[in-house]
Image: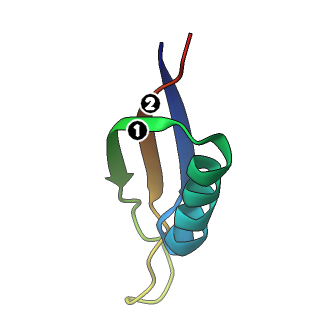
């Protein structure tokens, strides 16, 4: 049976998100069918320094299969 798992974070925390995803994959032992992701950029806060950046949202969707 195919199922979906969604992970959401911000781009400043990608290494931690990767660790969380890998732990989940190892723990569940599922068979991964595909992994897709999306990064949305955020506008820098107004009134801040010119080199200020707001963190963008990161979403990763894992399509996996488990035995029915």
**Quadrant position of residue 58:** bottom left
- Residue density around tag 1, few if under 14, some if 14–19, many if 20 or more, within 10 Å: some
Looking at the image, the residue that sits furthest to the right is: 27
Residue 62 locus on image (x, y percent) = 43, 37
Q: Tell me what residue is drawn at x 34 percent, y 48 percent.
A: 38
- Please tell me whether residue 44 is drawn above or below residue 62 in the rendered image: below
Q: Tell me what residue is drawn at x 41 percent, y 60 percent.
A: 42
Q: Which residue is mark 1?
A: 32
> Which one is nearer the viewer's eye here, 38 or 21?
21
Q: Which mark is residue 42?
A: none
Q: Secondary structure at mark 1?
A: strand
Q: Which residue is mark 2?
A: 64
Q: Earlier in the sequence, mark 1 or mark 2?
A: 1
Q: Is 18 positioned to the left or the right of 50 in the image?
A: right
- Residue density around tag 2, few if under 14, some if 14–19, many if 20 or more, within 10 Å: some
> Which one is nearer the viewer's eye here, 3 or 53?
3
Residue 17 locus on image (x, y percent) = 57, 62
Residue 1 locus on image (x, y percent) = 48, 12
Q: Secondary structure at mark 2?
A: strand
**Contact flag, marks 1 and 2 (Cβ < 8 Å):** yes
- Please tell me whether residue 35 is drawn above or below residue 3 in the rendered image: below
Q: Is 44 positioned to the left or the right of 20 in the image?
A: left
Pick the quarter of the image with the C terminus: top right
> Which one is nearer the viewer's eye here, 26 or 62?
26
Q: CA distance from mark 1 to mark 2?
A: 4 Å
Q: Tell me what residue is drawn at x 53 percent, y 74 percent.
A: 15
Q: Tell me what residue is drawn at x 43 percent, y 71 percent.
A: 44
């Amino acid at each position: 049976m195919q199922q979906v798992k969604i992970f959401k974070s911000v781009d400043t925390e990608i290494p931690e998100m990767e660790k969380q995803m890998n732990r989940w994959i190892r723990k569940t032992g599922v068979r991964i069918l595909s992994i897709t992701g999306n990064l949305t950029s955020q506008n820098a806060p107004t009134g801040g320094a010119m080199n200020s950046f707001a963190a963008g949202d990161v979403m990763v969707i894992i399509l996996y299969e488990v035995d029915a």
